[in-house]
Image (cartoon, rainbow, N blue to C red):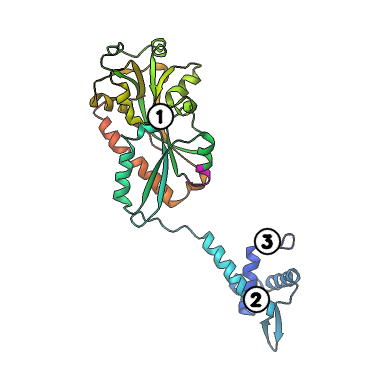
Amino acid sequence: MEPVNGAFDVRLMRTLLLLVTECSVSRTAEILGQTQPTVSLALKRLRELIGDPILVRSGSSLVPTERGQELRATLQRLLADIDALLAPPPSFEPDRTERRFRIAAANCLDAEFLPRIFARLAEEAPRASIDIATLPGHDDLMSHLADGSLDLVVGNWPRPPEQLRLAPLLSTPIKCVVAADHRLAGTIGSLDMEFYLAERHLSPSADVMKQYSPIDGRLMELGLSRHIAASVPEYAIVPHMLAGSDLVFTTGAPFAEQMAQGGDFAVIDAPVEFGRMDFYLLWHDCKHHSPAHIWFRHLVKASVSPLRDSADSVPQILRVAAE
């Protein structure tokens, strides 16, 4: 490659290092697999660029000038750094890593999904750590993923950012959960949207976070809205708020069934307009090729397997999607 604007490229740097190391144009040419005239021409360019002879005659031999000796030491360090930088990344060893991974997740996954990640991480990477954060606002979410302070997002809102990498995790029908004595408790089939919107609702997402809600986000797409009579910061509070109230809670089928098993609740099919609730992983390109991150993404996806297996006994409750 030709020098540009007084600079020279890595190939010319390697030629220069060989010249001041071998002190021979012919041996340098042989090592590089080039002709002697080609290397002689390269030496001429280098002398013009650096403003120094680099190699001078000493009897029948060539010796480096003082500047040539300085360049040799500097080039050895520079090229070693370049080679190390461009070398293939070291293999990732989960059982030895002490890395701390950080996930932001939809809070409906707290009880059903996240403990499985902890358990699998403890088994495969006992020295590693994991932090679970709540979903930040859109701008913070993008910046945290871009600067690497956030590894993964587990989301379920209708329109994930297109500029992020995405891998589907699971897809589930949407259900409504009400107290056992609620007037809708005996509803057969899917709840009519008109009746649904007339109810008072409980949500784990405040109004300012509606774009991250798979329910309110879908309603916004339909040009509709519901009355959220109460919102809670933690998903675990939902059963306590719902019990004995006139509130309606809408969530994915596995989580609705889990609630129904643990309390006096009824589960109803949500309006068909909602479709399904899809969960997926999101991450930034800056982490895409990292061996540690690749391993962690696979670990998170593998953590879904027990949910898939349990779903086999409840048809259509949960389907796992491949990346």
Mark 1 lies on a secondary structure that is strand
Which comes sooner in the sequence, label 1 or label 2? 2
Position of 296 compared to 317: left or right? right
Query: Which label belongs to residue 1?
Result: 3
Image quadrant where one finds the C terminus: top left
Write the residue at 46% across / 57% down: 89
Mark 3 lies on a secondary structure that is loop
Q: Amino acid at mark 3?
A: Met
Q: Marks 1/3: CA distance?
A: 51 Å
Write the residue at 68% across / 72% down: 39
Image quadrant where one finds the N terminus: bottom right
Residue 165 in magenta? no
Q: Give residue 51's position: percent from left, percent from top.
A: 75, 72
Query: Magenta part of the protein: which range?
Result: 144-149
Q: Give residue 24's position: percent from left, percent from top.
A: 65, 79
Q: Give residue 195's position: percent from left, percent from top.
A: 39, 10
Query: Which label belongs to residue 89?
Result: none
Is residue 258 placed above or below 286 in the rendered structure? above
Q: Give residue 200's position: percent from left, percent from top.
A: 39, 15
Mark 2 lies on a secondary structure that is helix
Task: Name which quarter of the figure residue 156 lies in.
Answer: top left
Mark 1 Cα-neighbour bin, 10 Å: few <14, some 14–19, many ≥20: many
Q: Amino acid at mark 2?
A: Glu
Residue 147 in magenta? yes
Residue under label 2: 70
Labels 2, 3: front one: 2
